[in-house]
Image (cartoon, helix red, strand yellow):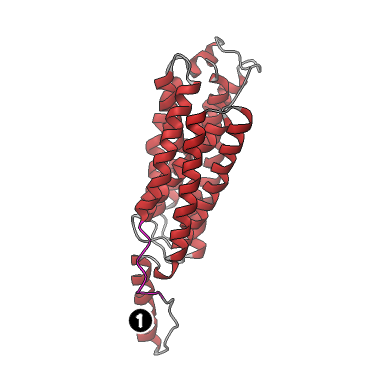
């Protein structure tokens, strides 16, 4: 029987996205609206996790922690909205410098984006609060569904959260370059690197017995003559290939390179989900 702990999966996805939102936010470069995009997605994921968990497979500790992550995400979003007028440090500096250059070159005063200096800037560290709740939920969920391999189960959930969070935030950030022209590529490159860093951890943990080698050997029947096992292998290999190609694309100087990288990350999300979800479904209960 192929099964999937959907509630814990949704928590893992949201937790990873929140963690990498903090990683990007600490740079003080990306506009505050990007945080709203990620947090809005996480609110939907966490609400789904709570509802699915309570309805189909309740685990008290996990569901309470997931609810805590949901409330924390809502609270952080409210703080971010109330401090939106402050912008972020490097965004303010670049906006002012760009306006000054235009005025110097053309003699025309360019209307620059205004910021409220009386407001304190949003502290990115607040995005770590939902991460703490999410990690607790993943530990409890991993223990509850891990059977005789609880440590391995928890490790897989934490690695999956990081893996899916990095690739999801990377795709969303790639789109944000349309909203914030002139944003340096360093934040996007950082997320792409993290997809590469988390990929081997994700793959190795799913190979640790009882793992995907059992599917390849036929010890675990996928119901399709082993085809799903090879689909997992193809997804894993394609994901790291797309990471390499995306990094190569971002070395190009043209602005179109960012859009090309974003398109590649779209594909990487599909293959990354194939890497994570197929393995979880096949190995559930083993």
Which SS class for mark 1? Answer: helix
Residue 27 point in image, percent of width and height: 33, 57
Question: Does residue 126 appear left or right of residue 214 in this picture?
Answer: left
* The one of 263 and 169 positioned closer to us in this rendering: 169
Q: Quadrant of the N terminus?
A: top right
Q: What residue span does the magenta drawing correspond to? A: 115-123
Q: Give the prevailing secondary structure in the magenta stretch.
A: loop
The local crowd at label 1, few if under 14, some if 14 to 19, many if 20 or more residues have their Cα within 10 Å, is some
Check the image and report above or below for 145 versus 45: above
Residue 64 point in image, percent of width and height: 49, 36
Check the image and report above or below for 160 versus 184: above
Q: Residue furthest top?
A: 219
* The one of 106 and 118 positioned closer to us in this rendering: 118
Check the image and report above or below for 45 versus 138: below
Asked whether the viewer can see residue 257, the reply is: no
Residue 9 point in image, percent of width and height: 53, 33
> Residue at point 49% right, 47% down?
71
Q: Which residue is mark 1?
A: 100
Q: Is residue 219 magenta?
A: no
Residue 154 point in image, percent of width and height: 42, 26
> Residue at point 63% right, 28% down?
56
Q: Is residue 121 magenta?
A: yes
Asked whether the viewer can see residue 29, the reply is: yes
> Residue at point 53% right, 25% down?
280
């Amino acid at each position: 029987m192929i099964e999937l702990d959907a509630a814990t999966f949704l928590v893992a996805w949201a937790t990873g996205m929140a963690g990498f939102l903090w990683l990007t936010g600490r740079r003080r470069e990306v506009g505050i609206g990007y945080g709203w995009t990620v947090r809005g997605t996480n609110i939907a994921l966490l609400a789904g996790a709570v509802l699915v968990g309570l309805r189909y497979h309740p685990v008290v500790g996990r569901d309470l922690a997931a609810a805590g992550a949901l409330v924390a995400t809502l609270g952080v979003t409210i703080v971010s909205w109330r401090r939106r007028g402050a912008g972020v440090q490097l965004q303010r500096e670049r906006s002012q410098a760009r306006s000054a250059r235009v005025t110097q070159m053309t003699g025309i005063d360019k209307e620059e984006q205004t910021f409220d200096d009386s407001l304190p800037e949003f502290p990115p560290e607040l995005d770590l609060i939902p991460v703490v709740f999410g990690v607790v939920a993943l530990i409890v969920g991993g223990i509850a569904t891990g059977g005789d391999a609880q440590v391995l189960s928890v490790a897989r959930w934490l690695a999956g959260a990081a893996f899916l969070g990095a690739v999801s935030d990377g795709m969303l950030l790639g789109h944000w370059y349309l909203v914030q022209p002139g944003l340096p590529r360093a934040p996007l490159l950082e997320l792409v690197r993290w997809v590469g860093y988390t990929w081997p951890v994700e793959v190795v943990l799913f190979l640790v017995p009882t793992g995907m080698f059992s599917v390849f050997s036929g010890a675990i029947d996928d119901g399709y003559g082993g085809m799903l096992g090879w689909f997992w292998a193809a997804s894993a290999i394609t994901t790291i290939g797309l990471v390499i190609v995306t990094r190569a694309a971002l070395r190009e100087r043209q602005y179109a390179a960012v859009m090309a990288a974003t398109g590649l990350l779209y594909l990487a999300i599909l293959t990354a989900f194939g890497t994570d979800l197929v393995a979880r479904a096949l190995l559930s209960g083993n």
